[in-house]
Amino acid sequence: MEAKRGSLEATPRFDAQPREETFSQRLGRWLEDIAPSVFIWPAVLTVLFLAVFPLFVSLYLAFARVQLVVGGYEVEFIGFTNFEKLFFGSGRRNFLGRWDRDASFLGLPGMPTAIGWLGLIVLAGFLVYMLYRHGQRREYTPVMLFGKLGGIAALAVGAWYLTNWLVAAEGPMAGMWLAEQYWLLTVIPGAVVVLSAVALGVISMVLRLAIVAFMMGVAWLTAITLTPDGLPGTMVVTLVFVFCGVALQYVLGLGLALLVTQNLPGKRFFRVVFLLPMLITPVGIGFLFRMMTDTLQGPLAPLWAAAGLTDFSWVETATGARAAIIIADTWQWTPFMFIILLAALEGISNEPIEAALVDGANRWQLFRFIILPAIIPVSITLILIRTIEAFKIVDLPRIMTNGGPGTATESVTLFAFNQWKASATSIGYASSIAYLLLIISTFFALVLVNIGRRRLLELFE
């Protein structure tokens, strides 16, 4: 009892009335409550405005014409005129390229070579297989899918003919403004397709069909402009730099990373050496490879002479000039691929590898079923970053070949830069070129992330 009484007496007593907050405590609680709305959100909105404001300004300029006037300049809204110039006007040869007009297939312009046909057939087969797998997952029956897609196509054709009649008509029903808006022939039928696809529940299939149509169109344009009688435009040249360069960089980076993970002597030294190209600026790399490809005065001139190539120039042919830029870009960005893939390989657990070796797996099976599936997420992210960066290539073509010979190595970014530099009144035209590049790069990035990543993970499971 004594102990219990002592313990009760030792228990501290609390007043029933709460203590009054001091001024500093009330001020701290008030600042904590209003800080997100008074300080943080305005700062976030300011940074967001500064980041997005140039995007909207350039978007407006893409639909406008800048004219010099007395005392300054005048911006006039002209609609889709800049984009029409790229696809149907004087800028089509530079942007889309030139193809043999005398050759055609089923009404399509141009005619690919044998290699082009092979690539188109492989791509078409792959895309059809992807559509088939998507239809199986969604449990579309052939009759239901054919009926819904046929109805959507009929509505789209009807909307196109109606819009064409309104645009081509003259008089009070159409009006002068409507008669000049040929872009409505694309926008209105497209809106009808999307709305009807949502209503019928096949929007995912319609979107994939649109992706397939766009990719096949780009592939066809690439095939007919890379023929001996064709001339690729800046869009095709950029795609060549992106896909050839990124694929080569990934293969070399993965190969070097696999070699360095082996128990080889001096691998720490090679880890440092492989990263040296990343320390050089792109302009310096451009000048370096410009001198190296010079067979008369460059540092490799004695080697070219010993090989009997003194009269050879990399920039004499379009293929050689593009190859030189791809080699320089690969030399610059392979270390980036190497260091990320090396970290991914070193993060793989040794237990499944040891179990596979105990079961008698060879090196190819080890790579195919254990290593490659483990690095697929990292590889997709890495390829996505390099693809977005490669679409903006401008320094190497500008320094090494200045877009030549002719326009054989002129990328879309360099094309927009040259148009912007040519005249102050061409800033709207250059903005439209840049926005088309944004649309193309965003399309391929979304396809890679939303479709390619899922399919690769399913393939290597």
Image (cartoon, helix red, strand yellow):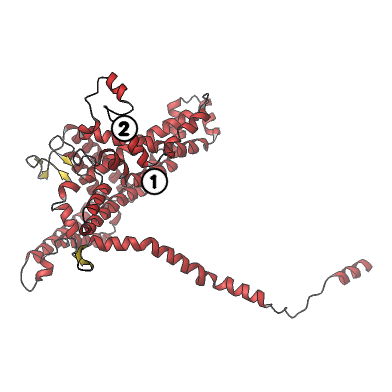
The residue at which mark 2 appears reads as: 291
Q: In this view, does 440 lie above or below 304?
A: below
Between 112 and 355, the one lying in front of the other is 112
Instruction: Tell me the quarter of the picture where residue 113 sits.
Output: top left
The type of residue carrying mark 2 is Met
Element at badge 1?
A: helix
Q: Earlier in the sequence, mark 1 or mark 2?
A: 2
**64 horizontally vs 339: left or right:** left
CB under 8 Å between discs 1 and 2 = no
How far across and how far down the image is residue 424, in percent? 23, 58
Front-most of 53 and 100? 53
Q: Which of marks 1 and 2 is in front?
A: 2
Percent across and percent down for residue 430 are: 24, 55
Q: Nearer the viewer, residue 133 or 21?
A: 21
Task: State the residue position of label 1.
Answer: 385
Q: In which quarter of the image is residue 460?
A: top left
Q: Is residue 162 visible?
A: yes
In the rendered image of this protein, does residue 416 appear above or below residue 26?
A: above
Counting from the top left corner in percent of width and height, residue 190 is at 21, 59
One can see residue 209 in this view: no
Q: Distance between the residues labelled 1 and 2?
A: 29 Å
Residue 209, image x, y percentages: 25, 50
